[in-house]
Image (tube, rainbow, N blue to C red):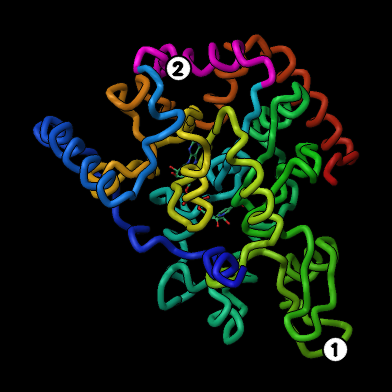
Amino acid sequence: MDKEIKEDRRDKNPDEEKPHISPKSSETEDYSEMERLGRYLAQKLRLIDFSGNDQRDESQRILRELSLDGIVEYIKENTNCKIITMAGAGISTSAGIPDFRSPSSGLYHKLEKYNLPHPQAIFELDFFMKNPEPFFTLARDLMPEGFKPTTCHYFIRLLWEKGLLLRHYTQNIDTLERIAGLPSDKLVEAHGTFHTGRCLKCRAPYTLSWMKEKIMGGIIPKCEECNEGIVKPDIIFFGEMLPERFQVLADRDFVQADLLIIMGSSLVVQPFASLIDRVRTTCPRLLINNEKVGMQDRLSRFLGLRQGLVFDSRNTHGGRDVAWLGDCDAGCQLLADKLGWRDDLQALIQREHESLNSGNRSDN
Ligand code: CNA
């Protein structure tokens, strides 16, 4: 148990700031030789299990084609398809909330004014205890104040309404999934949320509206119970443990999933990023993002380890990973159109936005 808890601390990936480099074509040719050797070594060293599903006949393709159409066909053929969605800041950028790492528009690009030792310091507990001001200044930009969920958020809700959503795992702290009306039992807020807060000294709980009033007024929220501690929103800082709900449900859900959809994340923050490897080896994985991320590195490929996304039809059973590159909203809209849900999605967005405009929020 102790070990599990340690592994679930929110960590920066050591490769976090390194760009993913696609293999050059000459290197690709070397791969089959290297892969064979790697798989042989890995098998000898018992690093991977070649039994079970992986031994299926190569002609049993998982997806008829490695494209959005292949995914659509797969969903239509699996009437009880259990879908897990995983999301990051990229699903909220069109709502007006900046992500971390997008060049020029991302938050990390805009942190110079805070004079931080390094950009992540703003989300580090030690730094926060000494100097909470930069976090609360930034929090004003991130507070769920007047932001509306995006097409992508409502697409996730539609998956739930269609009975296909096993669970939505989000790294976002903006509460837009709640505002979009996704029920809390379908939601895992892996990095916590602004929805609630706590005094760091006496642990007294505080509501979003209480914190919002202080933060938007430029006041550092101080506890009214002990009059000493700072009230920190319940978002997980680097080095803090992830909510227990994350570990419990991830253990249960990922082995059951029939499809994984990853949206708007650079997949660099651990342990969240490694969830993509917890689905079965026959579970297709669709990435909807501006850029390709989370790809298998050369060592894993060499050793035949199943880590990371492989957008390559030469892989087992014709491959199972699909990258749709572009805007999350456009990708979700296209997916909805191809699934025959265009009208349902439009009606849902219109109804919910009208309700938000009239002040009848449907968050939970
Ligand atoms: P990130 O590292 O900033 O990556 C975002 C990814 O989304 C990048 O690959 C972008 O290219 C991509 N992207 C951005 N906009 C779009 C778009 N409209 N369509 C498609 N792709 C897009 O963010 P991650 O979520 O991966 O990093 C994890 C951090 C970010 C979590 O701990 C969050 O707490 C944190 N964060 C959350 C929010 C929020 O709650 N909205 C905002 C900023 C940061």
* Observer able to see residue 41: yes
What number is the disc on residue 345? none
Point out residue 325 in the picture as x, y percentages from the top left corner: 41, 29
Q: Is residue 91 above or below residue 151?
A: below
Q: Residue at x 57, y 19 (%)?
A: 335
**Quadrant holding the N terminus:** bottom right
The answer to whether the residue labelled 2 contacts the one labelled 1, judged by CB atoms less than 8 Å apart, is no
What number is the disc on residue 226? 1
Q: Is residue 330 above or below residue 129?
A: above
Task: Give the amino acid at mark 2.
Answer: Leu
Point out residue 51 in the picture as x, y percentages from the top left corner: 41, 34
Q: Residue at x 59, y 72 (%)?
A: 2
User: Which quadrant of the structure image shows residue 320?
Assistant: top left
Q: Earlier in the sequence, mark 2 or mark 1?
A: 2
Q: In the picture provided, is 197 more to the left or to the right than 87?
A: right
Report helix, strand or loop for mark 1: loop
Q: How far separated are the C-alphas under marks 2 and 1?
A: 58 Å
Point out residue 330 in the picture as x, y percentages from the top left corner: 54, 24
User: Which quadrant of the structure image shows residue 21?
Assistant: top left
Point out residue 188 in the picture as x, y percentages from the top left corner: 69, 49
Q: In the picture provided, is 114 more to the left or to the right than 338?
A: left
Q: Which region is colored magenta?
A: 58-80
What residue is pinned by disc 2?
Answer: 63
Q: Is residue 193 magenta?
A: no
Q: Nearer the viewer, residue 254 or 269?
A: 254
Q: Residue at x 65, y 28 (%)?
A: 82
Task: Give the amino acid at mark 1.
Answer: Cys
Label 2 crowd bin: few (<14), some (14–19), many (20+), radius 10 Å: many
